[in-house]
Amino acid sequence: MEIRHFSPEDAASIQELVNLLQGHVAELDPFDRLRHSEDFDPARHFATVMDDVEKREGTVIVADDSGRIAGITIGAVIHQDEEYQMAHYPDKFGQIFEVCVHPDYRNQQVGQRLLASIENHLRSVGCEYVRLDCLATNEDAQRFYRKNGFKERNIQFMKKL
């Protein structure tokens, strides 16, 4: 298994994985606010994410199993605006937008290797911290992130009106 940076030939496989992830998290959303796979445009989503990655010192890392994309992670630098710095100590931090490992490759340390690689990239561009978001109902992902050194910091509450 090779962990490497994205190449344009990977786009279709990455979009398939992102669509798979979207379907999974949509099923876990207690408010049914996330688009399900059939209503989601992975090509448009990926183009938007790639634009963000290019503007913010980001990268896309893939796990390549002899030409089959087994997993991906996408991250970039978050630049703080003046309003943010009024309440927070200034620092440079990374945001991981996506972590997705194909079900055929789970529990084989693919996700752990992808996280390590994106963390190394973010560290190399000067980030002190990295953050990511996870649905409260995605308990498997939460266990994975905790196992890899992440700690809960914010809790978001939501209520239907």
Image: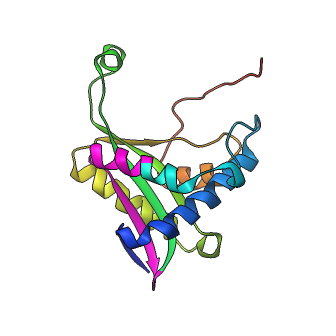
Residue 30, percent across and down? 77, 37
> Nearest the camera: 69 or 124?
69
Above or below, 12 against 89 in this view is: below
| Extreme-bottom residue of the structure | 66
Above or below, 85 against 27 in this view is: above
Residue 14, percent across and down? 50, 65
Name which residue lies at 54% across and 37% down: 152
Horizontal side, residue 152 vs residue 23: left or right: left
Residue 112, percent across and down? 48, 64
Horizontal side, residue 7 vs residue 46: left or right: left
> Nearest the camera: 128 or 22?
22
Query: In the picture, residue 126 is in which quadrant?
Result: top left
Q: Tell me the quarter of the image containing the N terminus.
A: bottom left
> Nearest the camera: 63 or 153?
63
Above or below, 159 against 151 in this view is: above
Name which residue lies at 36% across and 44% down: 52
Residue 60, percent across and down? 38, 59
Horizontal side, residue 159 vs residue 52: left or right: right
Q: Is residue 45 visible?
A: yes
Tell me the magenta residue range: 48-67
Q: Tell me the quarter of the image containing the C terminus.
A: top right
Query: In the picture, residue 106 is in which quadrant?
Result: bottom right
Residue 51 shown in magenta: yes
Name which residue lies at 71% across and 43% down: 137
Residue 36 shown in magenta: no
Above or below, 38 against 14 in this view is: above
Q: How is the image coloured?
A: rainbow
Name which residue lies at 27% across and 36% down: 92
Q: Is residue 139 visible?
A: no
State how many labels appear.
0
